[in-house]
Image (cartoon, rainbow, N blue to C red):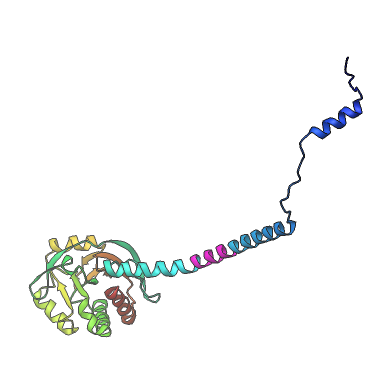
Amino acid sequence: MKLQTDNNPQENDLLEEDRSPVRQESTLPHHPQGSRHLRMNWRLASRLSVILLAILVILVVTITPFASGLITTAFNSLTGNTSNTRPPASLPATDLGNQPAPNFQLTDQGGKQVSLAQFKGKPVVVTFMYTHCPDICPLTAEHLHSTLLKMGSDANKVGILAVSTDPKGDDQAAAVKFTDAHNMQNYWHFLIGTQAQLSPVWSAYSVYAQQQQTTVNHTFAVYVVDKQGNNRSFIGQDFSPNDLATYLEELVHA
């Protein structure tokens, strides 16, 4: 006997559905409100980061020049670097670019050999004059004397070298007399020498000196050399002792 099969397609579809595995819905909770909170917190954190970064930039820009100034000052103090020291605005001074001052060695009013190099570690004023000068030289000597008086005890921390522009008329006796007349005994070295000894010094410092009948036609020159032996400034003829004293004191304590 043959079994009859049911070829009804609708029933077959129902049977197939009954045999298929049961699909289970996900039970994970869905929180759209929590997602919004996360997005809001992230935006807030981003904005705070930008604000903090801006504050940090402002602090760096504000503090860095001040800190840099302190560091520079401390370094200059430790190394003796005076390159940042500037003369007072009222002092007629020409910046010479901190170039090494030409060294020289001559004889002073006491017969001692004196060189510029031996004053390294002190500011030095180098000037040019002669003992029989009727006008500008005595005035310069008086201005230098007043400058040193205003400096008080710091005057001993500065070297003053007056180089003769009159090799024929400036001997040791004339140098001593001129020094005494302007009360510079304890302050300067008036340096004398022969034409051959003095002429190279004049040239090195761009000084013109020419003997006339009774006078010497020469360039006015006052140089300020710093503690490292560098030419700092050329001082004008009408300088004030107060201004020069202020400048030298700054170089002494730099």
Q: Main secondary structure of the magenta part?
A: helix
Q: Residue at x 17, y 65 (%)?
A: 117
In the picture, the quarter occupied by the C terminus is bottom left
Q: Residue at x 76, y 45 (%)?
A: 25
Relative to residue 70, is residue 251 drawn left or right? Answer: left
**Percent position (x, y) of residue 183?**
18, 84
Relative to residue 160, is residue 9 drawn left or right? Answer: right
**Percent position (x, y) of residue 15?**
85, 31
Relative to residue 61, is residue 226 drawn left or right? Answer: left
**Percent position (x, y) of residue 8?**
92, 25
Asked if residue 221 can be seen in this view, the reply is no
Please say whether residue 142 is one of the residues in the magenta stretch: no
Please say whether residue 55 is one of the residues in the magenta stretch: yes
Quarter-of-image position of residue 192: bottom left
**Which residue range is magenta in the image?**
51-60
Nearest to the observer: residue 138 or residue 39:
39
Nearest to the observer: residue 93 or residue 152:
152
Nearest to the observer: residue 248 or residue 180:
248
Quarter-of-image position of residue 174: bottom left
**Percent position (x, y) of residue 105?**
14, 65
Q: Residue at x 70, y 59 (%)?
A: 34
